[in-house]
Amino acid sequence: MAIHESGEDYLEAILMIKKRNGNVRSIDIAHELSFSKPSVSVAMKNLKASNYITIDENGFINLTETGQEIADKIYERHTFLTGWLTSIGVDPKVAAEDACKMEHAISAESFAAIKKSIAGTNENYSNPRK
């Protein structure tokens, strides 16, 4: 099943919060993305129905294998593109905003080609977002 950009953003946020805090609840996602609790609740219901997440009896949210794969892909694209844009002189805030847009739109082929092209420079553009 295809996932929309907003779903990818939610999965990426879950991944980032999990890395930071160890556990994720809906309220954490609402704070991270500056969304209302009801909006996050609806999104979590949809992601759960699509088998991208599980929610345990304590309200903790976990990524399924499929959800983890998508979150990892989006997170890698975001960190790489942010680091690369920053390295070529783009303001870090603008670079992060642009990377957020690009991470969803770029094809796997184009992203791999960019990474391959840049790999020759021995640069590592892994700058995790805060």
Image: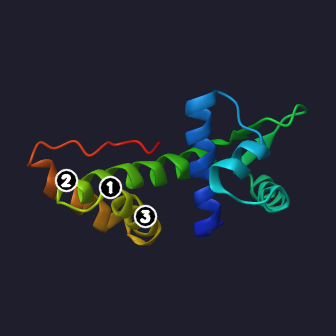
Q: Can you see residue 6?
A: yes
Return the residue at label 1: 92
Q: Secondary structure at mark 1?
A: helix
Type of amino acid at the residue the image marks with label 2: Ser
Lower sequence index among marks 2 and 3: 2
Q: CA distance from mark 2 to mark 1?
A: 9 Å
Name the residue located 78 percent from the left edge and 57 percent from the top edge.
40
Q: Residue 116 at what x, y percent from top left?
A: 18, 54
10 Å neighbourhood of mark 1: few (<14), some, or many (≥20)? some
Q: Determine the image quadrant of residue 102.
A: bottom left
Return the residue at label 3: 97
Q: Can you see residue 3?
A: no
Q: Secondary structure at mark 3?
A: helix
- Which is more toward the observer, 117 or 125? 125
Of badges 2 and 1, nearer the viewer stands: 1
Q: Residue 73 at what x, y percent from top left?
A: 46, 51
Please tell me the numbered disc located at residue 65: none
Left or right of residue 120: residue 103 = right
10 Å neighbourhood of mark 3: few (<14), some, or many (≥20)? few
10 Å neighbourhood of mark 2: few (<14), some, or many (≥20)? some
Say if 56 sits above or below 2 in the image: above
Type of amino acid at the residue the image marks with label 3: Glu
Name the residue located 28 percent from the left edge and 60 percent from the top edge.
91
Q: CA distance from mark 3 to mark 1?
A: 9 Å
Q: Residue 120 at what x, y percent from top left?
A: 8, 49
Name the residue located 72 percent from the left edge and 42 percent from the top edge.
28
Type of amino acid at the residue the image marks with label 1: Pro
Say if 102 sits above or below 15 in the image: below
Return the residue at label 2: 87
Q: Secondary structure at mark 2?
A: helix
Say if 16 sits above or below 107 in the image: above
Task: Evaluate if marks 2 and 1 touch, with contact meaning CB atoms under 8 Å apart.
Answer: no
